Image (cartoon, grey):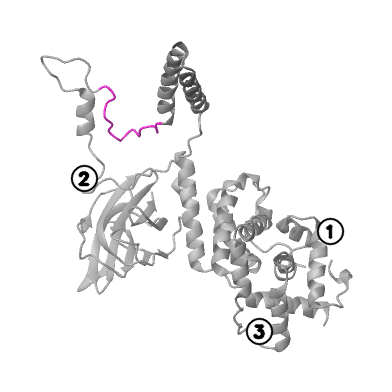
Amino acid sequence: MIGLVAGDATSDSAVLEPAAFTAHLEAALDAAHRLATVMLRDRSAAEDAVQEAALKAWRKRDQLRGAASFRTWFLSIVANECRMARRTRWWHVIRVAETPEPRVAEVTDVTSGELRDAVLRLDPADRAALFCFFYLDLPMEEVARVLGISRAAARSRVYRAAQRLRPELDPEELR
Amino acid sequence: MSQRQLHDRIRRAFSAVTRPPRPLLTERIRESLWDVAVQGAEGRRLPVPPVALIAAVLVVLLAAAAVLEVPAVVGTVAAAGRAVSSQVARTLTPPRTAGTPTPSATPSRTPSATPTPTPAATAAVATPTATPTAPPSVPAAPALPPATLPGFSCAQQYGGNGQATMSTARVGAQSGYDRFVIEFSGPVPAFEVTPQDSAAFAQSGGQVQLQGSAGLAVVLRNTSGSAFGGPRELRPGFPVIQEARLLSDSQGVVQWGIGIARPACFHAWALTGPSRLVIDIAT
């Protein structure tokens, strides 16, 4: 399991300088944007959420303890922002849920297409947990930190979501 | 399906339903961070002073006293209210910048038979500006060292997607950076700012050499200088900006050249109210 991506392992300074902050932010932007898209299923809403999260991160950057944890810390702010966006814009969720997802060229075989559809049918919170664990390759502790829940709850959420995709999944496989 | 296969397929599924962020998002975030950093440096967020709270309480008391028709109480509370109000006004008034001439709060004391010019007023009028060929630049002058502000980079920068005519251009020298501004009549059009190693720029019919040893080439699309009323050539002799010149204006594409004293990082961004392209060059 890969932990943090390259670029996260830097100095341990308590408060990032603005230039360093921007560099770390831009390194985490791809993951942040994809996480927001997974949670909100709308590109514009995801961009708004990431931008707002970036501002919030900037304002409370003194709370960041060690630049090495920047990515997880920022992703947790993004996830929180997405949750708030979903709460305050419930109509948006309904609208998106009714919109069929476009077929994507990369998914060619039927099995992958079905899996993708199954992923999209998951509850957003479960989908986010699955994304953090399988796509970002975050350890379960960091999945929990990003989602603002306990490690046990994160593991349970990942297991539950993965089991819906493959019912015969052994929980021991999710370590 | 093995766990490894499941892992790979879920990863591919997420890869298919998500996309990398658009470059525009990065630009948006840079701009918003810049705004926040500048606001933080300027201390625009004035804390609500406790005296304002006291004033509000006094107003309530005054209203209550007026209802109860107690003249003595009304007089006392009104006097206290006036004192607090003046204190509130002083507290909330933003501090004047040193270079900004301000009218005197007491313009004349007593009438005099032999009027003499007030030194303060004379000094305010006679104060020379740093940019004799252009009006002062954007008033925001962040106290934060620009080199540490987000947004500065030494690579090509671009943005804007509007369509508008240029109205004017100006330069300004700020603490830590020089600023070049182009104002537009509408949304800032698409722009590219490209650094180069010399101050020589291509122009129809050959090359033009501007002052300086390096340059920034500014290309604007979907715009024109048909209504341009500003200077086409600026030679401010600032620490970095040596010369700025409108090089060409043809078929919706306008090119400016900025000759700078040495290669420098910069920050190009679009602002509104008025709509303008701002290029800050680190000094």
Q: Residue at x 56, y 69 (%)?
A: A43
Q: Which residues are magenta?
A: B93-106
State the mark number for residue B132.
2
Look at mark 3 in the image and give the residue it sits on.
A107
Discs 3, 2: same chain: no
Crowding around mark 1 (Cα neighbors within 10 Å: few <14, some 14 to 19, many 20+) is: few
Eye-nearest disc, 3 or 2: 3
Q: CA distance from mark 1 to mark 2?
A: 68 Å
* Subunit bearing disc 3: A
Residue occupying the point 36% across, 67% down: B190
Q: Residue furthest front?
A: B68
Amino acid under disc 2:
Pro
From this viewpoint, is residue B9 visible? yes
- Name the side, left or right, on which A123 lies relative to B137: right
Residue A154, image x and y in percent? 79, 61
| Residue B210 visible, this orientation | no
Magenta-drawn stretch, dominant element (helix, strand or loop): loop
Q: Is residue B97 magenta?
A: yes
The chain identifier of the residue carrying mark 1 reads: A
Q: Nearer the viewer, residue B92 or A130?
A: B92
- For the residue pair B72 and B281, the one nearer the viewer reads as B72
Marks 1 and 2: CB-CB under 8 Å?
A: no
Label 2 CA crowd tier, 10 Å (few <14, some 14–19, many 20+): few
Q: At 46% from the left edge and 50% from the top edge, which residue is drawn?
A: B35
Q: Secondary structure at mark 3?
A: loop
N-term mark: 1 or 3: 3
- Depth check: give the residue in front, B176 or B115: B115
Which residue type carries mark 1? Ala
Give yes or no for contact between labels 1 and 3 (Cβ–Cβ under 8 Å). Answer: no
Write down the residue under mark 1.
A152
